[in-house]
Amino acid sequence: MLAIFELTSAQRDDLRTVAAMIIPASDEYKVPGADDPAVQADMLATLGRDTALVAQALDHLARLASRPLAELDTARRDAVATEFRATGGAAAATLVRVVLQCYYRDDRVLRSLGLELRAPFPKGYTLEHGDWALLDPVKARSGKLRRA
Amino acid sequence: MNKNDPVDVLIIGAGASGAAVAWSLAETKMHILCLDQGGWMKPSEYPSTGRDWEAKFYGEWSTSPNIRGRPEDYPINDDNSPIKVVNFNGVGGSTVMYTAHWPRLHPSDFKVKTLDGVADDWPIDYDALTPFFEENDRMMGVSGLSGDPLSPLTHPPMPPQPLGLSGPLIGKAMNKLGWHWWPSDTTVATMDYEGRARCINLGHCTPACAQGAKASTDITYWPQAVRAGVELKTHCRVREILTNEHGMASGVVYYDQDGVEQFQPAEVVIIACNGVGTPRLLLNSVSGRFPNGLANSSGLVGKNLMFHPYAQIYGFVKEPTDSNRAPPTCLWSKEFYDTDLSRGFVRGYGIQFGRGAGPVFEAVASEQKGILPWGEDHHRVFRKLNGHRLAVSAICEDLPEEHNRVTLDPVLKDSHGIPAPKIDYTISENSRKMMEHGLARGREILEAAGATDICINNPIPWGGWHLLGTARMGTDPARSVVNEWGRSHDVKNLFIVDGSVFVTSGGVNPTSTIQAIALYVADQMKQRLANLFD
């Protein structure tokens, strides 16, 4: 929970705004946007070692926008986002990754993708054996190991 | 400094090679001690046990020690290398964190000078290692299909991994092109084996297997070695090897779990820290007698670093692939393994195929590549990409070049104040041509599979898994660090058994060969016990 206190209120506002720009809500796919309160709470609670880079990215974003991102019109906001991705380096990449990694483990999102809401272990997954006759042409071709 | 009771054999490093050599030497009933800077692993804490399993790959389970930053890790300055070092530190070493892909070097890989006029021949050949490959395959527990016409003959004790959804897509594409492919030998148990449960497709073998189906030496060699009497001390980081007035290794100085400096005397010292850790330790072991580092009269300690540059190309097919619901690799190809000078380069590469990726990895990678947009179209595009990825990676033979090297960083130190390694590495023109060839062939494969949205990683930046060549073996003390059975030319009771002794790299993952060499060196030591230091 420490991370909540490491981003300022303004940074959290911009994080929410940019998250929605990356992944907006969709009625078609029945999924929330990445600005959804639960997704945002997950981000803030698990920032951990990424906090410094994310804060750095948000500072960069704030400099580009000169005001809270939410107050910009759509065209200006898109221009800022383009500039942010082009010039933000590792910090911007970290921010985007944090948004994506929290969004794509949200129950509603995984359900929409048809994925099970669980850790891989201990149930695992079943794998089809497949058609081993596909190897027949390989076996039929002449081929030899290079002699030493 | 505390002084411990002397031991007969001291092994530094409990990873792939340290475990194998410890197990093999245990039958001598000598007092064998292994020191490792890490601890025993806890499978209950492995990523696949949690819903946040993918996020962990970007943090505490990153393949990069610089990102991971566990207390067991040491920093590596790899700023001057397009390929970053990846490894794992702890009991089991990098076998805890690898894909379990299990090819062997080919017989021709040991004779590159004779066959192709480049680099050097090894002082040993494939036949010398054959019994140790076989023994190692039994110990690690290998699955696969015997009879690959373009690979050395193996006898895997378990059947191959299922083809799943991705395998047939790749197989059909390769058949369309008339190119070789075959189920990979892997150290993934496909049936219950020697106390290990069979694979249940947790889907991401690389960062440790909670099921224990993937062989790592903490669950294969070490339990048997410990039962046989080998002592393993964890969280002990070796700083340097000391020598006596006769120029023999007298033991090591290490920091114990509490950070207390200890001296451990030993009759024989075996280094098993792989291609970065081993030269780092030797270069840190400076004395009046060995001012340029231990075992370094040739000046070759740290030089000739070989990585295997990976040229990766991937795309997305309409059919569903295995995504994260299967071990990541299951097939290989040796179609372009051998030299064909008409291709514009010497030597060749193996191909390993990737079955897919999980949703977080897919989102992050595709956004970075610019094929997954921000905004409204994000959802549609993501559903087209996720669960549809196929990957082709050319694992290119890296030839030895002295300017590719490990030295000591003048500033960077680990948590004990020990100078950290610095990597200087460039990809050679020959490797560049090989990588371009691999990418072109990979594109043909993906197109034959019907893939679109094709992307490349050339090289895979965090692809420095294979750390080879930095203490090469040879018969000439002026051109090698250890002799043909792993003993230092300069220090007669010092042995090296890891990837640093490789003379050339081949075009395949090296762990099987590393362990076969470790078993071979152990066997040589056992045969020569009466005159080991002559």
Image (cartoon, coloured by chain):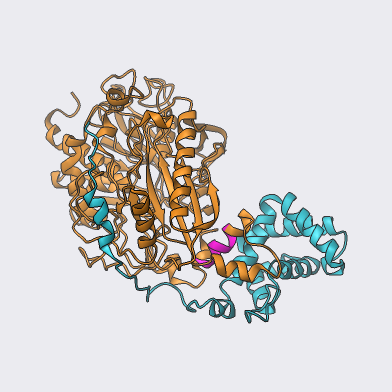
Could you tell me residue B516's position as x and y percent?
Answer: 24, 42
Answer yes or no: is residue B251 visible.
yes
Could you tell me residue A89's position as x and y percent?
Answer: 69, 50
Q: Is residue B102 left or right of residue B259?
A: left
Q: Residue at x 87, y 67 (%)?
A: A73
Q: Residue at x 63, y 71 (%)?
A: B379
Magenta highlight: main SS: helix
Could you tell me residue B458's position as x and y percent?
Answer: 52, 43
The stretch in magenta equals: B358-365
Indicate whether A124 appears above or below B295: below
Q: Nearer the viewer, residue B41 or B511?
A: B511
Q: Is residue B422 left or right of residue B513?
A: right
Could you tell me residue B41's position as x and y percent?
Answer: 38, 60
Q: Which color was chain B given? A: orange
Q: Nearer the viewer, residue B519 or B144?
A: B144
Q: Is residue A75 left or right of residue A53?
A: right
Q: Is residue B76 left or right of residue B304?
A: right
Instruction: Locate the N terminus of chain B and report the quarter of the image it occupies.
Output: top left
Q: Quadrant of residue B513?
A: top left
- Decide whether residue B167 is among the magenta residues: no
Q: Quadrant of residue B104?
A: top left
- Decide whether residue B363 is among the magenta residues: yes
Q: Which chain is cyan?
A: A
Indicate whether B277 appears above or below B144: above
Instruction: Locate the C terminus of chain B and report the quarter of the image it occupies.
Output: top left
Answer yes or no: is residue B260 visible.
no
Figure label count: 0
